[in-house]
Amino acid sequence: DTEVTQTPKHLVMGMTNKKSLKCEQHMGHRAMYWYKQKAKKPPELMFVYSYEKLSINESVPSRFSPECPNSSLLNLHLHALQPEDSALYLCASSQVGADYNEQFFGPGTRLTVL
Amino acid sequence: KNQVEQSPQSLIILEGKNCTLQCNYTVSPFSNLRWYKQDTGRGPVSLTIMTFSENTKSNGRYTATLDADTKQSSLHITASQLSDSASYICVVSDAGGGNKLTFGTGTQLKVEL
């Protein structure tokens, strides 16, 4: 299985809602990533987990809260978001260790904040 | 600051024609360079990945080249198909650990009949 899955595909939420994005992979990868991508822009790294521990937080606002409950799952909890947070949220996974390790991306969750 | 620049920004070609996309980077220390294809609203899919010592790598109708001296790469698409319409993103990984990627802004390719 060489696939990264993400749910939901689309999410519309109000600024006072709490929601979560889910990402799953069964490739045995021990590094998982969250990216945010605005239209016609490249993905921007948000968080990196390595061996289920948060290793990189790219100064992301606290209204985004990542969680890695086990080696296959990665969640992104959302609370009190702003309309400018509307974007495509991509999850990726890779082996840990070498910079050569290829990152496999999921299809993304299209988030709209009203 | 690490940067990846791509040209052209957008390109329209007729089905069956060939095209070449360009990528220039200033990433140090360099580890590897990747080309991804991203369909609208979907996640990027890897086409090729090249390290410092590799000059060329092919994946079907896609051929990537790398000149590590001039810090340039190209992606050549042969006999284009309608399904090649997508954004092509050049991505460079530095050797600083953490597998952090620097993304180019992409070339938007449209293949028409």
Image (tube, coloured by chain):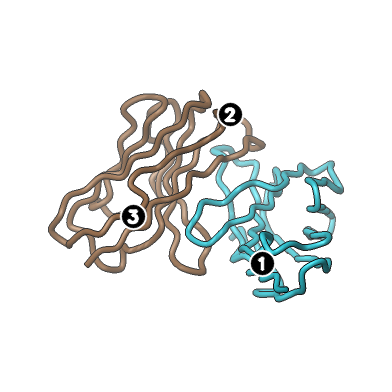
Chain colours: A brown, B cyan
Q: Which residue is mark 1?
A: B5
Residue A59 relative to residue B30: left or right: left
Q: Hey, which residue is sitting farthest left in the picture? A: A16
Residue B108: x and y in percent read 63, 69
Q: Which residue is mark 2?
A: A97
Residues beneath discs 3 and 2 located on the same chain? yes
Q: Which residue is mark 3?
A: A10
**Residue plotted at (53% across, 26% down):** A27
Q: Quadrant of the C terminus of chain A?
A: bottom left
Tag 3: Cα neighbours inside 10 Å, few (<14), some, or many (≥20)? few
Residues beneath discs 2 and 1 located on the same chain? no
In space, the residues marked 2 and 1 are separated at their CA atoms by: 27 Å
Q: Chain of mark 2?
A: A
Q: Chain of mark 3?
A: A
Q: Label 3 sits on what residue type?
A: His
Q: Secondary structure at mark 3?
A: strand
Residue B76: x and y in percent read 81, 60
In space, the residues marked 3 and 2 are separated at their CA atoms by: 33 Å
Q: Nearer the viewer, residue B21 or A57?
A: B21
**Residue plotted at (80% across, 52% down):** B61
How many numbered tags mark residues here?
3
Tag 2: Cα neighbours inside 10 Å, few (<14), some, or many (≥20)? few
Q: Label 1 sits on what residue type?
A: Glu
Q: Label 2 sits on what residue type?
A: Gly
Q: Secondary structure at mark 1?
A: strand
Tag 1: Cα neighbours inside 10 Å, few (<14), some, or many (≥20)? many
Q: Secondary structure at mark 2?
A: loop
Q: Nearer the viewer, residue A25 or A101?
A: A25
